[in-house]
Image (cartoon, rainbow, N blue to C red):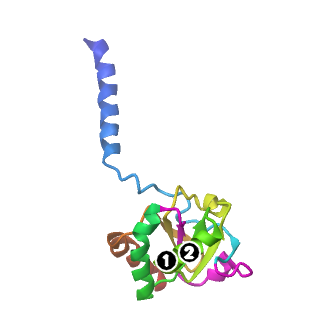
Amino acid sequence: MKRFLLPLAIFVVVVGFLGIGLTLNPREVPSPLVGKPAPEFALPQLHDPQQMLSLQDLRGKVWLLNFWASWCGGCKEEHPVLMQLAKNGEVPIYGMDYKDRRDEGVAWLRRWGNPYSVIAVDESGRVGINYGVYGVPETYVIDKAGVIRYKQIGPLDESILDKKIMPLVRELQQQ
């Protein structure tokens, strides 16, 4: 009888961990970059390739960095939320057109609207890799010192904005 107790105990522990794991939200993957300086970048802008956008241009303000692409279904889903947020003007949104063709990105924005202050083009995806992008859309809250304070994997919705992102943005803007 005792020889069955150890395997039974191991089985119960494994089932317990599995049960806990099944209750977690897969979109809330903790990012090792939260609390660390945002990776540097300097990329051409979507609408004016002769102009560059760099992390240095954005220091001193709280802002959102949204990785998106014209081929992304989730990006279309979150786009009305970004448009409303841009209309409110509480926080600037900078876009990163990720692994996309410039002409397709421009056409997509022409069709659906442009919520971004400026958009950079990450055609190769290297900046996305540096930011730990799993897939688009992904949105980052970055503080005045250039530190990543929050990462949202997947489409933004009103609930995420109201409960997580905007309270954090307001707090960071007052610091």
- Residue identified by numbered label 2: 107
Q: What's the distance in space between the residues labelled 2 and 1, CA to CA? A: 6 Å
Q: 104 or 161: nearer the eye?
A: 104
| Residue 132 position within the rendered picture, expressed as x and y whole percent measured from the top left | 57, 58
The amino acid type of the residue labelled 2 equals Ala
Residue 9 left/right relative to 33? left
Q: Quadrant of the N terminus?
A: top left
| Residue 149 position within the rendered picture, expressed as x and y whole percent measured from the top left | 50, 69
Find out whether residue 67 is within the magenta segment.
yes
| Residue 92 position within the rendered picture, expressed as x and y whole percent measured from the top left | 51, 83
Residue drawn at (66%, 64%) of the image: 123
Q: Is 27 placed above or below 162 here?
A: above
Image quadrant assignment for residue 168: bottom left
Q: Which residues are magenta?
A: 47-72
Image quadrant assignment for residue 4: top left
Whether residue 72 can be seen here: yes
Find out whether residue 158 is within the magenta segment.
no
Q: 109 or 149: nearer the eye?
A: 109
Q: Is 134 placed above or below 174 here?
A: above
Image quadrant assignment for residue 142: bottom right
Q: Secondary structure at mark 1?
A: helix
Cβ atoms at labels 2 and 1 below 8 Å apart: yes
Residue 123 left/right relative to 9? right
Q: Is 101 placed above or below 119 here?
A: above
- Marker disc for residue 111: 1
In the picture as drawn, the residue positioned furthest to the left comes out as 1
